[in-house]
Amino acid sequence: MEVLLIAFSFVTVVIAMSCYCKSNQCAESVRLDSNSPIGLYWLLAVVSSALALFTAVTALGVYEGTLAWLSIHTLILVPILLFSPFNLSQDDSQ
């Protein structure tokens, strides 16, 4: 059962990271207006991150589960930030 919860936590972390990247991509290409999907992507990212934390903590207990969740997030987030195809800098030199 614990293995399934950790696998589900891994899947939800992947969903969260893809939503974070998609919201950054939308923020670069779309001006903030009422039809912008950025808020939906951020909401999905936060909800899936919370679900991932909950399943990891449930599977392994509070201390080990939190460490597992942080490790999974780090293993997925660092390569995305290092090798991102999106320009994540806030520099607007025109």
Image (cartoon, helix red, strand yellow):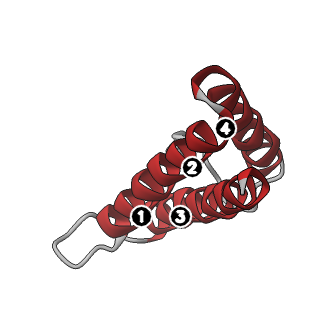
| Disc 1 versus disc 4: nearer the observer | 4
**CA separation, marks 2 and 4?**
9 Å
- Residue occupied by mark 4: 69
Q: Amino acid at mark 2?
A: Thr
Residue 55 numbered mark, or none: 2
| Disc 2 versus disc 3: nearer the observer | 2
**CA separation, marks 2 and 3?**
19 Å
Q: Where, quadrant-wise, is the N terminus in this rendering?
A: bottom right
- Residue occupied by mark 3: 19
In the image, residue 55 above or below residue 25: above
Q: Is residue 85 left or right of residue 9?
A: right
Q: Amino acid at mark 1?
A: Leu
**CA separation, marks 2 and 1?**
16 Å
Q: Are marks 2 and 4 in contact (CB under 8 Å)?
A: no
**CA separation, marks 3 and 1?**
7 Å
| Disc 2 versus disc 1: nearer the observer | 2
